[in-house]
Image: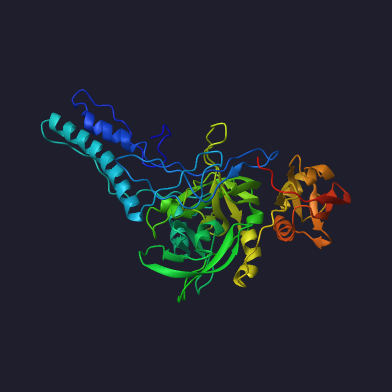
Amino acid sequence: MTDEPDDGIEAIPIEPTPEEPVVDDTVAAAAAASSSSAPNTDAHSEHDVESIEPIVDVSSMPVPMEPTFVAPPIVDVVPLSSQPTPAPAKRSLWSTRLSLLLVAALVGGLAGHYASDSSSSKGGGVTIDAVTNKPGAAYLPNGMSIPKLIVKALPSIVSIDVKGSGEEDQGTGMIITKNGLVITNNHVIAAAVNSGTITVTRSGSTKTLPATLIGTNPIDDVALIRINNVSGLTPVTFGDSNGLEVGDAVVAIGNALGLAAGTPTVTSGIVSALGRTVTAGSQSTSETLNNMIQTDAAINPGNSGGPLLDSSGNVVGMNTAVAGTLPDGTSAQNIGFAIPDATIESLLKQLKAGESIVNHGAFIGVEITTETPSLQAEYHFTVSSGAVVMSVISGTGAATAGMKQGDIIVGINHTSVGSAQDVGSITSALRPGDVITLHIVRGSKHLDIKVTLGTVPKS
């Protein structure tokens, strides 16, 4: 048992009135046990843009156990590598649902107990005021109600279950074509790369459908699968992640905690930051994801591969990871990361062709984001496109070469760069130790800087 607070359903103590009897010790003990039995969420951590984001593991997750409750299977994102990561116990989705029912029953039992005592103390009769009005919907700033947005989005979202090499992983995917192509995170389907099975469940259904792996890209943590023998599906509509601004409203949808395939969880929030660099990986592998969207919309294990939607219901990102406990024990709250839709769209041609990208680990040493009209207006950039350097990582090739915050990368080795995605595409084929020429704009000056590629720092 841990002293961590419950991340799931929490029993709320109720003060008994003078007429009400005190809850007996058995019920109180059961409620206390239920309040500490949900697993920790996985983690990334927010740092200032002056430093690289902390390492986040996306392959497993510690699962604290209670004798009265079997914890949900955590499959797609995990805590910082500094945390202990014991091998998760094997358990079925049925056991997950059963455990949640047990917690809900304890909370409901407490509420019923007090209500019953209150009625008996008043002579056996209770008068209840009730209304028949429908609960009010939550609205986004553009006037779109979240329930209407959900109705629009759900037909294009699937839950994913992967089995292979003795492992079972769960996540979320987005339908992108009528004939069943689905985009998701690479780490969601990693167990099926060599040998394994992939099944999907469409929203609103309990029927599992077989799927085939088409292409993988572990560098950008994106993969493409196809639902077998289907047609007439409803694809998502991609938005414009390059047009996002901090403070924009967003909604996250996904198979959170694998609670019930076909019934996704919905959360809402805002864009908290743009251009984040996040280093993620398991005990054996790691990857650096650039130009990530940061949001405070709750993202939980199982959400990976699901959509981050704008206020019109268009996909602006793919939910990928969350921040949790830092090495010093500090807990981060409401910090999630999504891959921009611009990155996803730039990879689709290769993925559809069945290509699998190999990451050689080359790292320039900068955090970058795609230049937008709003960034150009705010910082008076003299060019309208490129990859803006948000920060330079000390001890890297970029730092040694003298790169500075605010530099705009417009080319690499005489290949034009119009976005942060272009930088990743070019460097993915290179190796640590390679020397590249960066064509940058600094103020009104155009400069060529030679940089020796390195690897991602361990911290």
Note whether residue 145 is visible: no
Q: Residue 322: image x %, image y %?
A: 54, 45
Looking at the image, is 18 positioned above or below residue 417? above
Q: Residue most toward the top?
A: 18
Quadrant of the rendering where the N terminus is positioned: top left
Q: Is residue 113 visible?
A: yes
Q: In this view, does 445 lie above or below 157?
A: above
| Residue drawn at x 53%, y 59% as measured from the top left | 190
Tell me what residue is drawn at x 60 percent, y 40 percent: 46
Image quadrant where one finds the C terminus: top right
Left or right of 76 in this view: 404: right
What residue lies at 63% left-to-right and 47% top-to-bottom?
279
Give the x, y percent position of residue 181: 53, 70
Whole-percent x, y for residue 332 in the image: 54, 37
Q: Which one is in front, 258 or 130? A: 258
What x and y, as percent, mark residue 349? 64, 70
Residue at image x 41%, y 31%?
3
In the picture, measured across the screen, residue 299 lies left or right of residue 49, that is: left
Please give left or right for residue 204 compared with residue 311 in the image.
Answer: left
Please tell me how many numbered marks the rendered image carries: 0
